[in-house]
Image (cartoon, helix red, strand yellow):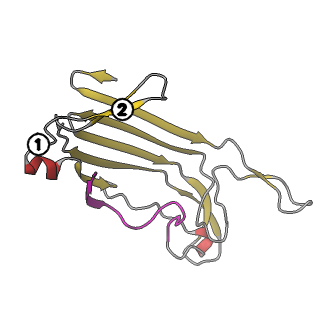
C-alpha cells in the first residue's frame, strides 16, 4: 500500500498438514503422524500441523523497517517418568518468535551521470552523456552513495526452543532440526553498491 508516509508491504504465509499416513509394514496399522513426533525414540523433529510467518515492511526515503512474526506448531511425543520405566504423553509446545530489522540506504542522484536511452524498436540505442563529464556529487556523497546500513535482532524476546524428550533419546532436549539454542541474536550489516 503506497501512502504519503511511505510504502507498507504485508505478506503472510501459512502451511497446514491435514494428515500424514504411515504404515511401517503390511501388517501394521496405518498411523496418522500429523501433529506427532517423527521418531518416537529420539523426537528430533515433529510433523507440525501449522507453520506460519507474517511480515510487515515500511519503506520511505531510504529507510526500511521490517518485522517478522513466526509461528511453529507443537506436536505430541512421549517421555519417560521419573523412574524411567513408564512412557507418558508429552506435548512439545508451539512457539512464536519475533524478528526486527531497520536499515537506511544512502542514495544521491548525480545530475551529470550518463543516462542510457533506447529506441522503441530496440534496434538503435544511443548513450546520452553530459557535456561537462564531471560529477555533481561531493566527495562524501560519492563515497556514501549506495551504502546500506542494517541493524537487526532475531528472536527479540529471547525465546528458548520447546522441550522435547523423545522417550529419553533426545540428547539436546529440543527439536534440533527446527530450532537452535542461539537465542536472541543482534547483528549489524553494511553493504555497498558500486
Question: Is 8 in the magenta?
Answer: no
What residue do we see at 60% from left, 46% from top?
A: 49
Residue 133 appears left or right of 157: left
Q: Which residues are magenta?
A: 173-194
Q: Earlier in the sequence, mark 2 or mark 1?
A: 2
Coordinates of residue 83 in the picture (x, y in percent): 58, 78
Give whichever of 21, 132 is nearer the camera: 132
In which quadrant will I find the N terminus?
top left
Coordinates of residue 8 in the picture (x, y in percent): 32, 29
| Disc number lying in front (2 or 1) | 2
- Residue occupied by mark 2: 126
Give whichever of 148, 126 is nearer the camera: 126
Q: Is residue 28 above or below residue 13?
A: below
Q: Is residue 120 above or below residue 148?
A: above
Q: Which secondary structure dominates the residues rendered in magenta?
A: loop
Q: Which mark is residue 137?
A: 1
Residue 96 appears left or right of 164: left
Coordinates of residue 157 in the picture (x, y in percent): 30, 54
How many labels, in total?
2
Amino acid at each position: 500500500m503506497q501512502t504519503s508516509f511511505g510504502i507498507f508491504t504485508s505478506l503472510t504465509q501459512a502451511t497446514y498438514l491435514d494428515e500424514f499416513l504411515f504404515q511401517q509394514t503390511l501388517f501394521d496399522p496405518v498411523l496418522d503422524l500429523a501433529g506427532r513426533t517423527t521418531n518416537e525414540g529420539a523426537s528430533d523433529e515433529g510433523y507440525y500441523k501449522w507453520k506460519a510467518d507474517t511480515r510487515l515492511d515500511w519503506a520511505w526515503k531510504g529507510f526500511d523497517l521490517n518485522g517478522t512474526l513466526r509461528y511453529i506448531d507443537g506436536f505430541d511425543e512421549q517421555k519417560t517418568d521419573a523412574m524411567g520405566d513408564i512412557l507418558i504423553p508429552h506435548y512439545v509446545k508451539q512457539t512464536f518468535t519475533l524478528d526486527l530489522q531497520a536499515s537506511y540506504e544512502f542514495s544521491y542522484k548525480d545530475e551529470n551521470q550518463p543516462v542510457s536511452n533506447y529506441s522503441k524498436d530496440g534496434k538503435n540505442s544511443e548513450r546520452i552523456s553530459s557535456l561537462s563529464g564531471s560529477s555533481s556529487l561531493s566527495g562524501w556523497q560519492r563515497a556514501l552513495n549506495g551504502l546500506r546500513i542494517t541493524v537487526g535482532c532475531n528472536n527479540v524476546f529471547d525465546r528458548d526452543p520447546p522441550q522435547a524428550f523423545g522417550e529419553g533419546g533426545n540428547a539436546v532436549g529440543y527439536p534440533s532440526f527446527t530450532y537452535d539454542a542461539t537465542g536472541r541474536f543482534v547483528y549489524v550489516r553494511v553493504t555497498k553498491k558500486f
